[in-house]
Amino acid sequence: MEPVLVGRAFKAPVWQLLPDGLIYRSYMAGAHEPRLSSTIDWDQGGTLLLDVVLGGRVGLIRYGTTDNLRPEGWQLDIEGAAFPRLNLDQDWDMESTDFRAGLPLTFGHGNWQAKFAYYHLSSHLGDEFAIRNPGALASRINYSRDALVLGISYYATPAARFYAESGWAFYMDGGSEPWEFQVGVDWSAPGPTGTCGTPFLAINGHLREELNFGGNLVVQTGWLWRGHSGHTLRTGLHYYNGKSSQFQFFNQFEQQLGLGAWYDY
């Protein structure tokens, strides 16, 4: 009887302050997910770019199980990140930086997870880009949005997670319009990987109303390492096609191929 009692205790929901692990994990190929990452990309014009993400998402409080990898229950998270872009062909000039901060409330049960979140996003032109392009400051935009998000994800198999998300902005500026949608899939072997790691594949599509519900497609594939806490390190190929992930240039088309490294909490 002892293993059964231990199993019940493990599954029993309890209050946890600053819990380990996340119930609703960031989309691997999401362009504006909070994490630590860098990708070196060659765009369609041959320019060498470095896109960096400096941020993360952590749990504040949970009422649920104590499993680090696939916890169940309710959890309130906090997230924040900066998304700077550097032009490596122009002495590492700063082109622009997006900033995002938010509060996701998440729920998980079995193979299903849900997220209701608020986020603020704003985009800022880089000073070195403005110096290199006289008149750029006069035409810069104040792209920003405060939005509410509803997301849902489902593990069709232990390795394959499918998700869909809708966002609606109640405040917007600089060309931003209310609605946005994301869909995608993350695939990798579940559980801790050890030192050998495991392959992964991630696909994300992001559609936005200001682009007449066009947007971008991101595909990433490579190798992944996952620890007992659920933290993951990935390296591999990165492909981007669509309107710019830097919202200061949200209406410009970009096609990129490069290499990346991503760390998720």
Image (spheres, rainbow, N blue to C red):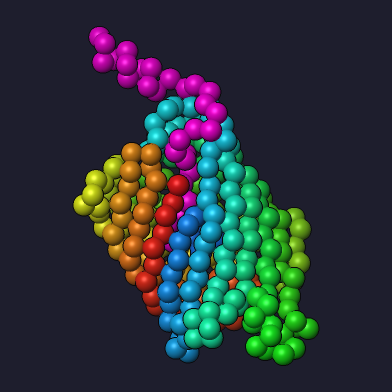
- Residue drawn at (35%, 58%) of the image: 234
Residue 17 makes an appearance in the image: yes
- Residue drawn at (60%, 52%) of the image: 80
- Residue drawn at (63%, 49%) of the image: 102
Asked if the magenta segment contains residue 5, the reply would be yes
Q: Where is the N terminus found, in terms of image quarters?
A: top left
- Give percent across and percent down for residue 265: 45, 47
- Give percent across and percent down for residue 184: 44, 58
- Give percent across and percent down for residue 167: 62, 55
Vertical arrangement, residue 130 with respect to residue 181, above or below: below
- Give percent across and percent down for residue 145: 71, 60
Give the residue furthest to the left: 196
Vertical arrangement, residue 74 with respect to residue 88, above or below: above
Give the residue furthest to the right: 138
Q: 231 or 69, which is in the foreground?
A: 231
The magenta stretch spans which residues? Answer: 1-29
- Residue drawn at (41%, 59%) of the image: 262
